[in-house]
Image (cartoon, rainbow, N blue to C red):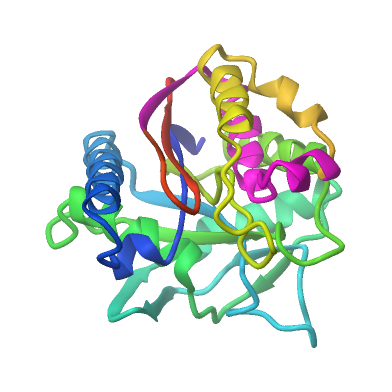
Amino acid sequence: MAKIVAAYASSHTPQLVVQPKISEEFTRQLQIVHNALMEVGRRIAAANADTVIVFGSDHMETFWLNNYPQLLLFTGTEVGGKFAGVELKLPSDPQLSKELLYGLIDMGFDVSFSHELELDHPYISPMYWVLKGAQHDSYRSKLVPFHVNSNVDPRIKPRRAFELGQAVRKVLESSSLPNRVALIATGGLSHFVGTPYYGKVDVEADNFLIEKMVSGRGYELADLTADWLDEHGEFEFRTWLAVIGAVNSAPAEVLAYQRAWHAGYCVMSFKL
């Protein structure tokens, strides 16, 4: 049986890697988030997780309108990408991802797959710091990206994202493999990139989501509508819902929250 030994959720932004010198306050905020992500890496290494499944959402950098998937699981042997001068290249876990793919299809999830994938900033910007914390040179985890469409209509419904996470857990629990698995969701929290409201951050909505997760009531968030997510800039919360479903709405701990000029940065750890 494969076992989920750690689970986290984090914002992703280009600024996490680019680190623009906008203000001393923003530099301080980024450092807080970097430290939290490195703590995630240390915890993943301490949990001896040998496979990390990362739920992310493409921004039309990896996929385009000629073939844009709702759900896509990477099934190749090595995965990587480049962003803002940072390059990641990691082994993947085709044996586990194949079990996930077939198991999810058997459970009614029509998941696409790819043996080749160029990662963009939703994966690279948080994972760069996670791997620094895990001391990447000595800790060689396998990375399995899982694309959950949060950005291009029509998008997966919030409840379906939650149910996806539940299904992932069931497939892992029935696996013949002994993997120790860590889960990471990337995206959010509140931001309005690509809209006239860019720069607005709905802190009240962020706090609402955080309080539900901290209290172990994340399952209630599966009832949120797609319109609510869009209205409050929480459209990428779909990836978080997948992890919440996978950990049975376990209570969470806030490792960092920063209301920056353009986004609500948050890093959460679920208590398994």
- Of residues 198 and 186, the one nearer the viewer is 198
Left or right of 62, for residue 12 = left
The verdict on residue 237 being magenta is yes
Q: Is residue 267 above or below residue 50?
A: above
Quadrant of the image occupied by residue 143: bottom left
Residue at 43% across, 42% down: 181
Above or below, 78 relative to 102: below
Position of 154 with respect to 148 (left or right) is right
Q: Is 194 covered by the magenta stretch?
A: no
Magenta stretch? 227-256
* Point 29% across, 50% down: residue: 30
The residue positioned 67% from the left and 47% from the top of the image is: 233
Left or right: residue 78 compared with residue 111: left
Residue 46 visible somewhere in the drawing: yes
Q: Whole-percent x and y of residue 190?
A: 59, 44
**Residue beneath the point at 83% across and 46% down:** 157
Outermost residue on the bottom side: it is 66
Q: Which quadrant: the C terminus?
A: top left
Can you give x and y, in whole percent of width and height, for residue 94 in the image? Answer: 51, 65
Q: Is residue 93 visible?
A: no
Q: Position of residue 108 (x, y in %)?
A: 86, 48
Q: Quadrant of residue 102?
A: bottom right
Q: How many marks?
A: 0
Q: Position of residue 264 (x, y in %)?
A: 49, 43
